[in-house]
Image (cartoon, helix red, strand yellow):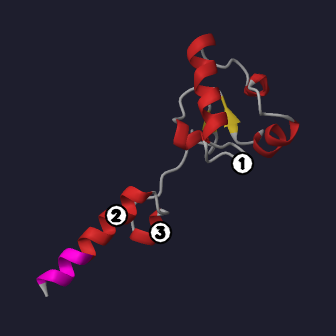
Amino acid sequence: MIAKVLLGLLLSIALAVSGAPPWVYGGPQQSAPTDSDGKVNINTASKSELMKLKGVGREIAEKIIDYREKNGPFKKPEEIRKITGIGKGIWEANRETITVK
């Protein structure tokens, strides 16, 4: 009985560490930092939070963070298009979701 409990605990930890989706192991779902209207603040979002935007993977998320660290915060949401790899398609898919508040 104790072995089954320990096995279940170890499996839960392994799934959480492996990056399995939260619904697999019952952990909390994380979302990008949003304001009251549900928009993602690209000036404060972490890499993993930025990666939740449509079409934004690890590399582009890192470029967004690098850009804001070197140039200061974005002043307007559309400035995200200055990031190499963010073209019209990614901008259009996320324009209603992105904010710079």
Identify the image quadrant of the C terminus: top right
Mark 1 residue element: loop
Q: Which residue is mark 1?
A: 54
- Residue 51: % across, % down: 61, 44
Q: Nearer the viewer, mark 2 or mark 1?
A: 2
Label 1 CA crowd tier, 10 Å (few <14, some 14–19, many 20+): some
Please state which amino acid type lies under the numbered disc 1.
Lys
Q: Which residue is mark 3?
A: 23
Q: Is residue 52 left or right of residue 10?
A: right
Q: Nearer the viewer, mark 3 or mark 2?
A: 2
Q: Are marks 2 and 1 in contact (CB under 8 Å)?
A: no
Q: Using the rendered view, name the quadrant where residue 22 is placed.
A: bottom left
Please state which amino acid type lies under the numbered disc 2.
Ala
Identify the image quadrant of the N terminus: bottom left
Q: Nearer the viewer, residue 3 or 22?
A: 3
Residue furthest to the right: 88
Residue furthest to the top: 71
- Magenta: predominant secondary structure element? helix
Q: Using the rendered view, name the quadrant where residue 5 is placed.
A: bottom left
Magenta region, residue range: 2-7
- Residue 18: % across, % down: 42, 58
Reply above or below: 53 against 67: below
Q: CA distance from mark 2 to mark 1?
A: 27 Å
Q: Are marks 1 and 3 in contact (CB under 8 Å)?
A: no
Label 3 CA crowd tier, 10 Å (few <14, some 14–19, many 20+): few
Q: Nearer the viewer, residue 71 or 8?
A: 8
Q: Is residue 18 left or right of residue 1?
A: right
